[in-house]
Structure formats: C-alpha cells, structure tokens
Amino acid sequence: MGKIIGPCTGKYYCAFRRLCCKISDLIPMHPHTMLTPPITISIAFVRSMLSCADGEDVKEWLHQAHIPPALLDETASRVTAEQYVALYNVIMKQLDDEGLGL
C-alpha cells in the first residue's frame, strides 16, 4: 500500500485514507517531486555553445532543441537543462564533434 500523503484524521478519515492510498499507489511520491523547481541554465551558456556555428543554421538547431530564438536576445532568459542537453546533442550530431569545435 502507498504512503499516506495527507492528514488522515476526523470524520472523513476512512474516505480520505482510501483516496490517499489510491493516489499514492498510482503516483510515486518522491520528496522532491513537487517541491523542486526545474533546473535552468543561463542563455549566456547557450550563446557560447552556438559560437561554434560557423555559418550553420542556428535557428534550425534551436528549433530542434525546442528553444525559441527570441530568447537569445534577452540577457536574463534561461533554458531548461533538457533544452540545453538537447541543443548540445543537436550540435554534436551536426558537427560530428563532441567538443563542439573547441
């Protein structure tokens, strides 16, 4: 049976306990599941990664990584770690170079 995720007291104890157990059996409850914000990376690192473009189609790379090109112009913008990794993988594949031209 799953972990109880709320207070099970009072006259609704049984119904609440059954609901909580059903929910927690379906959704794995990890302590950080709902409390941790997504990991984000400054757009400056994205710009730096794109510096190896050397005439390549940067907009297509950004599209494949699901990064809106307009974010490059906003100094305070951030991308998720998933987008950053996706961009790295796209560039690495396009350039056939794990070092991204370093």
Image (cartoon, rainbow, N blue to C red):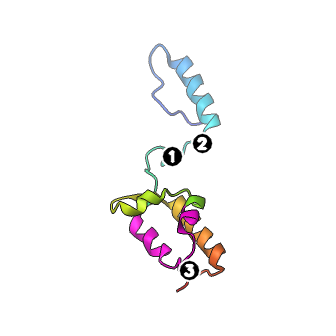
43 in magenta = yes
Q: Of the numbered discs in the image, which one, if any, rests on residue 81?
A: none
Q: Is residue 10 above or below residue 61?
A: above
Seen from the viewer's position, the closer of residues 49 and 20 is 49
The secondary structure type at the circle numbered 3 is loop
Specify whether residue 31 is painted magenta: no
- Residue at mark 3 to residue at mark 2: CA–CA distance: 38 Å
Q: Can you give x and y, in whole percent of width and height, for residue 5 in the image?
A: 50, 34
Front residue (pair 82, 3): 82
Q: CA distance from mark 2 to mark 1?
A: 9 Å
Q: Does the residue at mark 2 contact the one at mark 1 (Cβ under 8 Å)?
A: yes
Q: Residue at x 35, y 60 (%)?
A: 74
Q: Select label 3 or label 2 by which is in front.
A: 3
Looking at the rendered image, the disc whose residue lies closer to the viewer, 3 or 1, is: 3
Query: Where is residue 97 drawn, in percent x and y?
Result: 62, 81
The CA span between labels 3 and 1 is: 33 Å
Q: Is residue 63 found left or right of 77 in the rendered image? A: right
Residue at position x 54%, y 62% from top? 62
Q: Residue at 56% of width from left, 18% of height from top?
A: 15
Identity of the residue furthest to the front in this view: 55
Q: Earlier in the sequence, mark 3 or mark 2?
A: 2
Q: Which residue is mark 2?
A: 28
Marks 2 and 1, the one that precedes in the sequence: 2
Front residue (pair 38, 12): 38
Q: Amino acid at mark 2?
A: Pro
Mark 3 closeness class: few <14, some 14–19, many ≥20 residues within 10 Å: some
Kind of residue at badge 1? Thr
Q: Which residue is mark 3?
A: 100
Residue 69 appears left or right of 26:
left
Question: Is 37 above or below relative to 54?
Answer: above
Q: Quadrant of residue 72?
A: bottom left
